[in-house]
Amino acid sequence: MLEKFRFLTSGESHGKCLTAIIEGLPAGLNIDTNFINSELKRRQQGYGRGGRMAIEADTAEITSGVRFGKTIGSPVTLVICNKDYENWQKIMSINPEDTNDEKSFTAYRPGHADYAGSIKYNHKDLRNVLERSSARKTAIEVAVGAVAKLFLKHYNIECTSKILQIGNGKTEEEFHKEIDKAKEAGDTLGGKFEITYTNLPVGLGSYVHWDRGIDGKIAQAVMSIPAVKSVSIGDGEDAYKISGKDFHDEIYCENGNITRNTNHAGGIEGGMTNGEDLIVKAVMKPIPTLKTPLATVDSKNMAETTAHFERSDTCAVEACAVVAEARIACVLANEIMLKYPTDYIE
Ligand SMILES: Cc1cc2nc3c(=O)[nH]c(=O)nc-3n(C[C@H](O)[C@H](O)[C@H](O)COP(=O)(O)O)c2cc1C
């Protein structure tokens, strides 16, 4: 789907490291590693997070494609080491002689990839599903997104995000109260967040084919974040409540420039950016790993039991918003590259 700004990632939650190779960046782009690491820090923070931040503050190492602080046109490789790997070396070993079941589990966790993943890949040990389906991989995606953001900054395109709701809470103080309440009850929460990108040129994306629309590309990028269950552009999710007269953003002209008084469309019309702010809203479901575990079945004997618990967040909506910023940055970087192809920037 990303034709120009392409990347692949690899790595397991408790494996040695997470890796990404990015291809398509022009030469001459300033790569600020402090910025990449500050984005990684943002992903690890937020009220309601579990213990991983205490174990390790993620930092990305660049192992190719950058020289003296600038891209050189070759693929850029990013690596984040899992410091916890020290304690998991035997459990995650690639050598057959190390085979052990120390951290194996066989009871499907509801709300996770365990059941479908074990059938799809024929895994008896659900650890094999957990390790890659875990949201740990979003760390390296945030690092890739940070590189995309550096590219977008070159075009003065900037991003902000905010949390709109967690449980029934609509203010920061209420978010914290809701999360505390859920934690005390051994429960978890999801929430709703909003991402805004400003200063986008008119005409990213296209109406000519269904798979060229930038709204569709953004929806796919955000919807596939673990635990995201709905994505909408602008006031899209409330559009059924409003009549056409009030929903559509009327067009005016000021000193020869197009202006609008509203932005219900969230910056996209006809699958293309229209020069207004891009606004994307998404909902994250409650974290599926609960301290008071959910009912399930053990795959080894089909007996009813309760789900496996492993260190887990109570609420990760703030982190999810950072991941969504990163995923959208990759889509936008790709669209800019399609519209303004160049091998180098100055
Ligand atoms: C940043 C982030 C952190 C997450 N942390 C946890 C967690 O600690 N425990 C958990 O059970 N799920 C967590 N999740 C959600 C699961 O990864 C997700 O629900 C699961 O992979 C199933 O994917 P699906 O909900 O999209 O079907 C997190 C998701 C994100 C985006």
Image (cartoon, grey):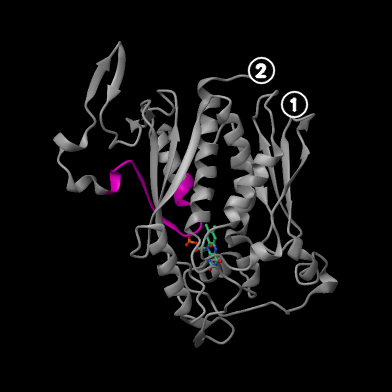
Q: Residue at x 72, y 34 (%)?
A: 75
Report x, y in % for residue 167. 37, 65
Would you identify the image quadrant in which residue 5 lies?
top right
The residue pinned by badge 1 equals: 72
Give the residues in magenta: 221-237
Is 183 placed above or below 253 here?
below
Q: Amino acid at mark 2?
A: Glu
Answer yes or no: disc 1 within 8 Å of ligand 1. no
Is residue 143 in the magenta section? no
**Disc 1 element:** loop
Report x, y in % for residue 118. 58, 69
Q: Residue at x 61, y 69 (%)?
A: 122
The residue pinned by badge 2 equals: 346
Q: Is residue 308 left or right of residue 234?
A: right
**Disc 2 element:** loop
Answer yes or no: disc 2 within 8 Å of ligand 1. no
